[in-house]
Image (tube, grey):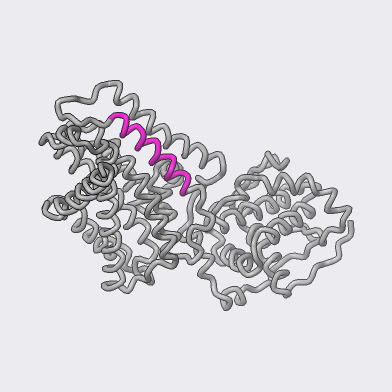
């Protein structure tokens, strides 16, 4: 009986928190008016896109969640703490963790309402397509909200008053807006800024939300981004709970800031893991848009300019027999485990693998032809034929997109050709493989 009363009390606290939010003019402005203004601003900035805002919805939703979690939540809780409400909550028979959880749940509902408002208005005003994977978009929203609400709880714990909430919130908000791929698209930032963005949760939030908005494959291949959001949110949330203050009379001292530094160290760990696995390379506009390539566009690729498999450029061994496959088994094992070739971004991973063939060819490696064949075999083994055809066509039609690898000492290729010539050979090798998949190029016999 007592437990049922506690649950009803927490539910009433949850409902009351929602009602008070809608009665607050400041909360409504921060929670709903500002997201709409960002929507209108993005529509004006990216008015040349077709369809309008389809490729910016990930950024817009991230801004909405970030603002509500890092400003809305701390402002409301700290204001209540200053009025003595949270000190009185401690006198209730309900567990303190339950009251805090009910507050976070109410904020999650408010974030979801604001995000839904943005999606509906974008569709109604600008004809922006609805999310291509709506169920997975909801999952991505929950992961992003978990991460940013953890950061908001940390701000709540260390902020002494409402003005300090604004200052601390801006310390999180502005870097992610300017350098984290949230306000400014990642692809237009300089290379150094793109690497810095890898140490911020905004990059991973935009990644998962945008993928579900524009691609039916949804969260496929987004495992690293989701784990990054969980790690950052869990670290911040755990420290936020530890430092949470119920009484306005207590101030955050130096030990509290040491704990904050330990929570932010999770950002360093995530960025370091991203760098170690080759995820911080320069981003190209819409690199994942290989899925938008049509069969007609694939069919438009021509193969008239290709050198032969036995010529000096882009040498390629014939399909292996059992003995040759065994001879190259060690190299194939290293290539399959090579981190840049295992990225969740399938188009970029394919560029990286083709770069290995290009580097071996340019530097006249003794096994250049065999290495190219191994690269082909790995690509064919990893992707269904239709998907691989679109990836290759995308690389061919966007030769300056993404990044290429021009130094692969870990695979035994120690010389470093220029990036420009690697890009040229990557395109030629992509054509050779695409032509074979389509049956437009036959395998050549090659004298050994």
Image location of residue 173, percent across then percent down? 29, 44
Up-down: is 311 above or below 156? below
Q: Residue at x 66, y 55 (%)?
A: 354
Q: Residue at x 75, y 54 (%)?
A: 374
- Check the image and name the residue furthest to the top: 254
Residue 413: image quadrant is top right
Image location of residue 16, percent across then percent down? 17, 50
**Quadrant in which the C terminus is drawn:** bottom right
**Viewed as shown, does residue 429 lie left or right of 199?**
right
Residue 58 inside the magenta-drawn segment: no
Q: Residue at x 10, y 36 (%)?
A: 83
Q: Residue at x 38, y 66 (%)?
A: 54
- Check the image and name the residue furthest to the bottom: 296
Judging depth in this view, the residue of 107 and 442 nearest the camera is 107
Q: Main secondary structure of the magenta part?
A: helix
- Check the image and name the residue furthest to the front: 1
Judging depth in this view, the residue of 410 and 161 nearest the camera is 161
Read off the magenta span. 226-243
* Residue 395 appears in the rendering: yes
């Amino acid at each position: 009986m007592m437990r049922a009363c506690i649950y009803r009390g927490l539910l009433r606290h949850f409902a009351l928190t929602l009602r008070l939010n809608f009665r607050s003019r400041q909360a409504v402005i921060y929670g709903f008016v500002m997201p709409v203004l960002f929507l209108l601003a993005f529509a004006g900035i990216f008015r040349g896109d077709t369809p309008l805002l389809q490729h910016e919805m990930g950024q817009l939703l991230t801004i909405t969640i970030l603002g509500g979690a890092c400003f809305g939540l701390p402002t409301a809780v700290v204001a209540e703490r200053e009025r003595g409400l949270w000190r009185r909550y401690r006198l209730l028979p309900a567990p303190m963790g339950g009251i805090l959880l009910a507050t976070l749940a109410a904020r999650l509902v408010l974030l979801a309402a604001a995000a839904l408002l943005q999606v509906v208005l974008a569709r109604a005003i600008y004809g922006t397509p609805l999310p291509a994977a709506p169920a997975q978009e909801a999952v991505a929203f929950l992961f992003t909200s978990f991460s940013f609400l953890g950061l908001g709880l940390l701000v709540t714990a260390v902020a002494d008053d409402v003005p300090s909430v604004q200052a601390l919130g801006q310390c999180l908000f502005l870097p992610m807006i300017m350098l984290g791929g949230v306000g400014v698209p990642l692809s237009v930032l300089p290379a150094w800024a793109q690497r810095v963005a890898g140490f911020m949760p905004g990059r991973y939030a935009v990644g998962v939300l945008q993928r579900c908005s524009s691609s039916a494959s949804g969260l496929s291949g987004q495992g690293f981004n989701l784990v990054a959001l969980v790690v950052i949110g869990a670290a911040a949330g755990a420290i936020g709970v530890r430092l949470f203050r119920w009484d306005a009379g207590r101030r955050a001292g130096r030990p509290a800031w040491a704990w904050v530094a330990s929570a932010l160290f999770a950002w360093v760990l995530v960025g370091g893991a991203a760098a170690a696995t080759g995820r911080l390379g320069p981003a190209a506009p819409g690199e994942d848009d290989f899925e938008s390539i049509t069969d007609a566009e694939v069919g438009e690729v021509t193969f008239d300019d290709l050198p032969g498999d036995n010529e000096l450029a882009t040498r390629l061994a014939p399909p292996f027999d059992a003995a040759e496959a065994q001879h190259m088994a060690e190299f194939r094992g290293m290539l399959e485990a090579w981190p840049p070739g295992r990225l969740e971004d399938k188009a970029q991973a394919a560029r990286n693998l083709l770069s290995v063939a290009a580097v071996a060819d340019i530097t006249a490696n003794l096994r250049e032809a065999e290495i190219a064949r191994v690269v082909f075999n790995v690509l064919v083994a990893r992707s269904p034929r239709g998907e691989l055809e679109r990836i290759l066509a995308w690389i061919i039609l966007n030769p300056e997109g993404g990044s290429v690898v021009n130094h692969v000492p870990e695979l035994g290729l120690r010389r470093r050709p220029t990036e420009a010539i690697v890009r040229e050979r990557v395109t030629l090798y992509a054509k050779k493989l695409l032509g074979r998949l389509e049956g437009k190029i036959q395998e050549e016999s090659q004298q050994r």
